[in-house]
Image (cartoon, grey):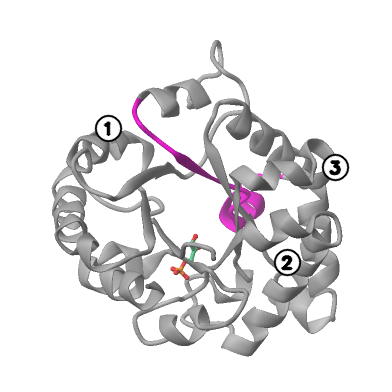
Amino acid sequence: MRQAMVAGNWKMNGSSASVSELIEGINAGVGETSAEIVVCPPFVYLSAIAAATADSAVKLGAQNMCDQDGGAFTGEISGPMLKDIGCEYVIIGHSERRAMYGETDEITAIKYGAVLKNGLKPIFCIGETLEERESGVTEDVIGRQIDAILESDGVASLANAVLAYEPVWAIGTGKTASPEQAQDVHAFIRGKIAALDAGIADGLRILYGGSMNPGNAADLIAQADIDGGLIGGASLKADDFLAICKAAG
Ligand code: 13P
């Protein structure tokens, strides 16, 4: 049985005051869910949130990571640094990084390997654009994005990773994939992994992300191959985020 997971991707939002209020709210309700709960604040707030979650079940994730361990890489943050301040997860391959910061399949695969090498766990994001969906190539796109990490690190690497299916057209748009649309893609992903290793596929958590909110979370997570959510906008309000966490278990 896979433990459900709900991760909040705070993206580039918040201030010292607002993130501390948000994490207090989340800490207060986290005892009411059996799901694994992760928050991914902006880098500059990671240490503060690490301190604020030291006595809570909430785990810490980063939104990005450099593939290098240290040195002359101005503006970058390394795996050893994330490990040092108490991160457990790192989001890799988010569509915003692919679309706005030039992260190719090759770069996402290199970063995925670096996350694992540092004893951290990738939350690896995949998803098609609206144009790709409408041209019927969703599975080709998802397959190619997953092949990048399978070719570099092999199927066994997924034992320490989480996948997040985030259709680009559903991110921040208020348009969510229907439970059936999402389940179809999740089943395709699990089937693709199962063809290589049935045990890994069975244990692999595949999250859905894209306008998930307290109103639609339960129906999405009820699907056989949807093991939780990667939440953007709704993760910035403690009550909404906790409602999604409770919908997950
Ligand atoms: P929204 O929940 O705001 O659509 O964002 C989803 C997302 O990109 C999480 O990584």
**Residue 181 placement: quadrant:** bottom right
Residue at 27% in and 50% down = 57
How many angstroms separate mark 1 from mark 3 (CA)?
34 Å
How many angstroms separate mark 2 from mark 3 (CA)?
17 Å
Q: Element under label 2?
A: helix
239 is higher (above) or lower (below) than 50:
below
Q: Residues within 10 Å of mark 3 (few under 14, many from 20)?
A: few
Residue at 68% in and 65% down = 127
Q: Quadrant of the N terminus?
A: bottom right
Q: Position of residue 184 (x, y in %)?
A: 71, 81
The amino acid on which the numbered mark 3 sits, given as a three-letter code, is Glu
Q: Magenta stretch: residue 3 in it? A: no
Give the label on residue 151, or none: 3
Q: What residue is shown with label 1?
A: 47
The amino acid on which the numbered mark 1 sits, given as a three-letter code, is Ser
Q: What residue is shown with label 2?
A: 190
Is residue 180 visible in the rendered image? The answer is yes
Which residue range is magenta in the image? Answer: 85-103
- Given residues 168 and 221, the one toward you in this image is 221
**Residue 8 placement: quadrant:** bottom left
Residue at 48% in and 21% down = 80
Q: Position of residue 5 (x, y in %)?
A: 45, 61
* The CB of the residue at mark 1 lies under 8 Å from ligand 1: no
- Given residues 215 and 206, the one toward you in this image is 206
Q: Element under label 1?
A: helix
